[in-house]
Amino acid sequence: MRFCERCGTGLVHPTAPPAVDTMDTERDIPAVVSAASPRPVARSIVDDVQEFLPTSEMDAIQPGGATSDAPDPAEAAPAAGHPHAMVALRLSSEERSAVAPKSVDVQAWEQWQGTHPIPSRLRVADQDWRCLARLDVADKESVRRFGFRIEEADNLSKEQGEGRYPGGAMVAGRGLRHRGGVAILTVPDLRVGAPVVMVRQSLAIGVELAEVSVGTGDDLIAEIRVHEADHVCVWRNRPTLIDASDVTQANLELRIYDTGSNPGLTWFNVWFYQPS
């Protein structure tokens, strides 16, 4: 066992058994940063990120179709309960949530927070769900398909995650971490009028605070609030619910504004589920 010299949080990375690398270590992180933002939430972008965020790639990014590398469809049992709470709260009112075909309890998704790989088909609170798309921020083609980019970040850096899920799986992955700014992506091929659960792979190394909106509108549809530091099991799958009333187009643009994460809001893989 050793303490991580990178993050300074006292994070412990188990050294055995060997990690399962879910990303190609030869690929460059293809995140995109734009100087213009419709909602300025940060002052500047650090200069040292330009080496892996060329302008030519930024201009090439276009929203696209669903990824072909969805999670493994094999069913897996949920991990045993874990003491660290993980919540993604909805901000929508009772009146707005009433239009959903069936009430969705996002906290019921916490049973999957410690499972890897997360199944492409699963059952949550007596409802069947199917993964429609997966964003992998370490894959250039996946980034292009989702039009994924980060704008107006105070600080943006590569993130190397390595450690264990509460369910026992050892995982190593490459992603991004930012403080301030907004992450923008377009989820393709959704069913209009049906709820969406966004499951974001992240690290339990501190505080994550963010607000979610659809498109360029100012109305907040969800909030991410997590305060969690696990020195042994570092990986989590964090769910956020998009109400059925907010899914108004098949290609839905989401904006996730960081509002005070420390050491930052992390991005590795993101899975998008709708009821089967």
Image (spheres, helix red, strand yellow):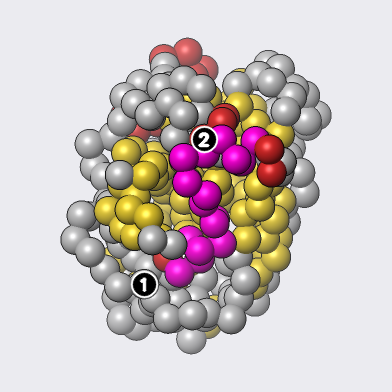
- 159 over 252 or under it: above or below: below
Which residue is at a point 47% across and 46% down the rendered structure image? 102
Which residue is at a point 19% across and 61% down the rendered structure image? 74
- 52 over 174 or under it: above or below: above
Confirm whether residue 49 shows in the render. Answer: no
Question: Looking at the rendering, which quadrant does residue 145 occupy?
Answer: top left
Q: Residues within 10 Å of mark 1 (few under 14, many from 20)?
A: some
List x then y, in percent, for residue 23: 32, 51
- 59 over 243 or under it: above or below: above
Which residue is at a point 50% across and 63% down the rendered structure image? 108
Stretch of the chain drawn in magenta:
96-111
**Which sits earlier in the primary sequence, circle 1 or circle 2?**
1
List x then y, in percent, for residue 91: 71, 43
List x then y, in percent, for residue 180: 73, 39
Determine the secondary structure under disc 2.
Answer: helix
Residue pointed to by mark 1: 78
| Label disc, if present, on residue 144 of the rendered structure | none
